[in-house]
Image (cartoon, helix red, strand yellow):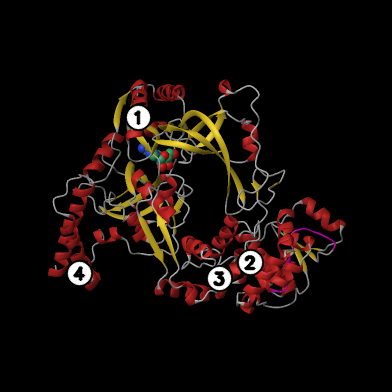
C-alpha cells in the first residue's frame, strides 16, 4: 500500500475509535483539541488524495455535502409499523392471543419506544452503505449523507464476524437539550420553532446541507436487524450482537417471562421517563424467539409478534385566567388560554391552545372555569375539557373575539370552516409579514438570501410594507440596519446588522428572482387558496395575468381543481385596487406575468380555440394528454357545457359524462380519433 494511503487508513481507524470512545463509551482518551488536529490532518490528506479516501472516513461526520433532491429508493425489506394500544388489558389480551397461537408461554423483549423517526441502514462488508427513511414502507428517501453525520451511527462495524450484507432498523431522535437549543436559536432569528423533538428530528434529517445536520446533534438507537442468514436465534441476542459490533442500541432492553413482567416494565418507565433526556412515547414488546416470530407472521401491515404500548398524555386541572387571540401569518385567529401556572410533564404550563371557535364552543368554557390541560406528543399543551365539578354557578360563557387584536378589523368565520380569520390581509401586521415570508419561500420566489428573520428586520425598519417594496430596495437603505436581540432574562444582548456582503447577497437574490417563471410568481403573490398546484394550472390555462384577472367565475371554474371558493377568492383579489397596484409594480420591476414563448410553444395550432374535456383512462397519463392538447393549441376544461368542443373519451369514461355530452350535443372522440385529428 502507498504510504500515504496507509497513513489515511490508520487515521480513519484511529479517529473512528476515538469517536466511539467519546460518544458510546463516554470515555475519551484524547482531548477535543487533539481529536480536531487529527481530523484536520486527515481532511488535508483527503483533499490532496481523494482517491485514497476511506468509505468510513470520519470526515463525513462533519458534513459538507448538499443534496438537491433526495433520491427515492425501494426498501430491500419493507418497513413495517407496529400495532399499538393505550390499555393494560389489551396487553394482556395480546399475550393470551399469542400464547393461544403458539401453544406455549412466551418470553418477550421489552424496549423503550423512541419518539423520533424510523430509519433503515444498510451495512455491506461492515461498512455503512445507505440510509433510507421509512417513506410509505415500501420506498423512502435516501438520506445517507445526513445520517453519516450522526456520531452514534457507526460508519464501520467493529469485529469481523458480521454477515456480508444486512440492514438495521432504528430511530433517529433529537435529545431534549438539543431541541430546546435549536428552538431558542430559531426564535432568535424569527423562524417558527418546532412543535416537538420528533418534528425537529424529521425536519433536520431532510435538510439539504449535511453540515447543518451535523451541527444540530441528532442521535440514533437501533432496535431491529434484518438479514437473510443472521446466525442468531433471539431478538435479544441479535441486539446484543449489534452492540458488540459498535452500534448504539436500546439502552434498557429487558427480557420478560410472561406479561406481568412486561407490565412491571411498562409501569416503571411510565414513571421514570420524565428523567430521560430524550423523548419516548411508550414501550415496545417483541416476542424474543425468532422461530416463534416466524410462526406468528404478520397481518397486512404489522408484525403479529410485537406491539407498542403508548403512554397516556399527562393531564392537569388548572384555573382559567383569560383568553388571548393570536393572529397567524395567514390571518387565522387562534384562541389561547392563560392559566394559573401548573407543572405538567416536566415544565410549568401557563398557556394552552383552545384551537378554534368550534372547539371552544364545544368545550363550553365559562369564565372562572377550571380546565384540563394536556401535553401529548406536542410540546404546546392543549385544553381538553372543563372540570365541571369546580364550575361556579351563573358563570358566563367566554365569547370568541369579534375584532382582530392586531388591527381591529371585524373577524370573519365561514360556516363550513373551523377557523376564524382576520380579513384585513394587507394592513394587519402578522399577515403582512406572512405574505412577505410566503413570497420569499423556496417554492415561490426562492429569495433565500432573505429569510424570515431578515424580512422582519426590513419590515420593522419600515423598508418594506408589501411584496412590491422588495424591488425598490437600494444598497444604501439596507447597509447597516440592525436589530437587537435580548435574551429572555434580559441579561445578554446581541446586535445583528446588515454588512456589505449581506446586502450584496440580498440584492443579488432579488435581481435573480426576476427569472422566476409565471406560475411561481402567481403562487408567490399569495392569492388566498391558490396553492402551488392551482397556480400552475391557472398559469397554463390563462397564460398571462391579464387573461386571468379578466376571467369570470365560470371561466375560472373551467380550470381543473378550481372550485367556487378558489374562484371567488381570485375575483376578490383582482377586485382590490391595492392588489392591482402591487401587481403593476411587480410587473414594472420585471417579474414574469406571462408564460414565456418557450413555455407556450405550441407544436401546431390545429386545436386553436377548441375547449376539450378529457375523461377516462388513456394509453398515456391524463396529465400528458392535457399537455398534448395545449401543445396543439387547445384548452383543457373540466366540465361539459354547450361551449365544449369535444369530449375526449378514454376507457372507463363515466356514463354520467357520456349522457351529459350527448344531451348538450358535444361530440365524443376516442383517443385514436384525437391522434388523427392532430396528425400524430
Ligand atoms: S420495532 C418490525 N422498536 O415506532 C419492527 N419500533 O410503529 C418495527 N419505534 O415505525 C419497529 N422505538 O419508528 C420498534 N424499540 C422500538 C421502537 C420502534 C420506536 C418506532 C418505529 C416504528 C414505530 C412503530
Q: Earlier in the sequence, mark 4 or mark 1?
A: 4
Q: Which residue is mark 4?
A: 45
Q: Residue at x 78, y 70 (%)?
A: 610
Q: Residue at x 66, y 37 (%)?
A: 399
Distance in Å between CA atoms under marks 1 and 3: 54 Å
Q: Which residue is mark 1?
A: 269
Please identify the quadrant where the N terminus is shown: bottom left
Q: Earlier in the sequence, mark 2 or mark 3?
A: 3
Distance in Å between CA atoms under marks 2 and 4: 50 Å
Q: Which residue is mark 2?
A: 522
Distance in Å between CA atoms under marks 4 and 1: 48 Å
Q: Which residue is mark 3?
A: 470
Distance in Å between CA atoms under marks 2 and 3: 16 Å
Q: Earlier in the sequence, mark 2 or mark 1?
A: 1
Determine if the C-beta at disc 1 is less than 8 A from ligand 1: no
Q: Earlier in the sequence, mark 3 or mark 4?
A: 4
Image quadrant assignment for residue 589: bottom right
- CB under 8 Å between discs 1 and 3: no
Amino acid at each position: 500500500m502507498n504510504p500515504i494511503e496507509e497513513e489515511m487508513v490508520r487515521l480513519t481507524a484511529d479517529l473512528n475509535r476515538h469517536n466511539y470512545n467519546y460518544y458510546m463509551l463516554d470515555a475519551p482518551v484524547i482531548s477535543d483539541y487533539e481529536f480536531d488536529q487529527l481530523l484536520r490532518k486527515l481532511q488535508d490528506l483527503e483533499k490532496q488524495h481523494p482517491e485514497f479516501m476511506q468509505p468510513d472516513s470520519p470526515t463525513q461526520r462533519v458534513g459538507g455535502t448538499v443534496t438537491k433532491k433526495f433520491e427515492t429508493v425501494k426498501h430491500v425489506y419493507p418497513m413495517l409499523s407496529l400495532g399499538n394500544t393505550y390499555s393494560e388489558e389489551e396487553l394482556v389480551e395480546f399475550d393470551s392471543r399469542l400464547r393461544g397461537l403458539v401453544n406455549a408461554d412466551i418470553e418477550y423483549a421489552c424496549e423503550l419506544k423512541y419518539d423520533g423517526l424510523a430509519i433503515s441502514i444498510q451495512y455491506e462488508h461492515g461498512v455503512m452503505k445507505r440510509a433510507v427513511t421509512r417513506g410509505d414502507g415500501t420506498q423512502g428517501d435516501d438520506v445517507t449523507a445526513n445520517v453519516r453525520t450522526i456520531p452514534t451511527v457507526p460508519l464501520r462495524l467493529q469485529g469481523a464476524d458480521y454477515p456480508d450484507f444486512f440492514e438495521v432498523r432504528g430511530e433517529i431522535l433529537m435529545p431534549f437539550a438539543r431541541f430546546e437549543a435549536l428552538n431558542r436559536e430559531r426564535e432568535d432569528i424569527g423562524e417558527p420553532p418546532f412543535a416537538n423533538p420528533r418534528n425537529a428530528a424529521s425536519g433536520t434529517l431532510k435538510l439539504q446541507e449535511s453540515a447543518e445536520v451535523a451541527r444540530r446533534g441528532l442521535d440514533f438507537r437501533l432496535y431491529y436487524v434484518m438479514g437473510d442468514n443472521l446466525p442468531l436465534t433471539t431478538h435479544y441476542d441479535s441486539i446484543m450482537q449489534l452492540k458488540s459490533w459498535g452500534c448504539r442500541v436500546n439502552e434498557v432492553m429487558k427480557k420478560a417471562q410472561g406479561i406481568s413482567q412486561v407490565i412491571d416494565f411498562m409501569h416503571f418507565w411510565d414513571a421514570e421517563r420524565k428523567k430521560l433526556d430524550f423523548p419516548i412515547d411508550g414501550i415496545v414488546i417483541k416476542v424474543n424467539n425468532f422461530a416463534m416470530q416466524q410462526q406468528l407472521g404478520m397481518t397486512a401491515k404489522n408484525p403479529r409478534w410485537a406491539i407498542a404500548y403508548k403512554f397516556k398524555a399527562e393531564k392537569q386541572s388548572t384555573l382559567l385566567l383569560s383568553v388571548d387571540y393570536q393572529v397567524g401569518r395567514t390571518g387565522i385567529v387562534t384562541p389561547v388560554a392563560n392559566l394559573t401556572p401548573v407543572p405538567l410533564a416536566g415544565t410549568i404550563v401557563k398557556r394552552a391552545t383552545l384551537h378554534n371557535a368550534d372547539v371552544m364552543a364545544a368545550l363550553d368554557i365559562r369564565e372562572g372555569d377550571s380546565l384540563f390541560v394536556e401535553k401529548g406528543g406536542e410540546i404546546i399543551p392543549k385544553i381538553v375539557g372543563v372540570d365541571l365539578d369546580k364550575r361556579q354557578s351563573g358563570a358566563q360563557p367566554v365569547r370568541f373575539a369579534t375584532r382582530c387584536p392586531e388591527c381591529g378589523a371585524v373577524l370573519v368565520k365561514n360556516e363550513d370552516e373551523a377557523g376564524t380569520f382576520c380579513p384585513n390581509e394587507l394592513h394587519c401586521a402578522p399577515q403582512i409579514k406572512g405574505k412577505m415570508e410566503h413570497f420569499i419561500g423556496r417554492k415561490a420566489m426562492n429569495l433565500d438570501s432573505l429569510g424570515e428573520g431578515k424580512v422582519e428586520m426590513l419590515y420593522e425598519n419600515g423598508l418594506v410594507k408589501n411584496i412590491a417594496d422588495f424591488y425598490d430596495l437600494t444598497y444604501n437603505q439596507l447597509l447597516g440596519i440592525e436589530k437587537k436581540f435580548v435574551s429572555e432574562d434580559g441579561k445578554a444582548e446581541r446586535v445583528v446588522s446588515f454588512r456589505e456582503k449581506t446586502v450584496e447577497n440580498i440584492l443579488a437574490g432579488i435581481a435573480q428572482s426576476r427569472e422566476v417563471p409565471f406560475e411561481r410568481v402567481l403562487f408567490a403573490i399569495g392569492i388566498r387558496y391558490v396553492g402551488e398546484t392551482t397556480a400552475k394550472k391557472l398559469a397554463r390555462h390563462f397564460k398571462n395575468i391579464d387573461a386571468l384577472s379578466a376571467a369570470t367565475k365560470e371561466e375560472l371554474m373551467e380550470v381543473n381543481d378550481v372550485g367556487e371558493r378558489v374562484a371567488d377568492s381570485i375575483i376578490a383579489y383582482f377586485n382590490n385596487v391595492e392588489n392591482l397596484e402591487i401587481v403593476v409594480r411587480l410587473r414594472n420591476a420585471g417579474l414574469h406575468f406571462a408564460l414565456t414563448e418557450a413555455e407556450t410553444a405550441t407544436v401546431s395550432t390545429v386545436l386553436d380555440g377548441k375547449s376539450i374535456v378529457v375523461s377516462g383512462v388513456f394509453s398515456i397519463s391524463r396529465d400528458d394528454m392535457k399537455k398534448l392538447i395545449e401543445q396543439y393549441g387547445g384548452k383543457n376544461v373540466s366540465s361539459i357545457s354547450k361551449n365544449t368542443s369535444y369530449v375526449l373519451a378514454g376507457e372507463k369514461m363515466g356514463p354520467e359524462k357520456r349522457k351529459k355530452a350527448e344531451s348538450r350535443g358535444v361530440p365524443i372522440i376516442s383517443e385514436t380519433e384525437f391522434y388523427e385529428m392532430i396528425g400524430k
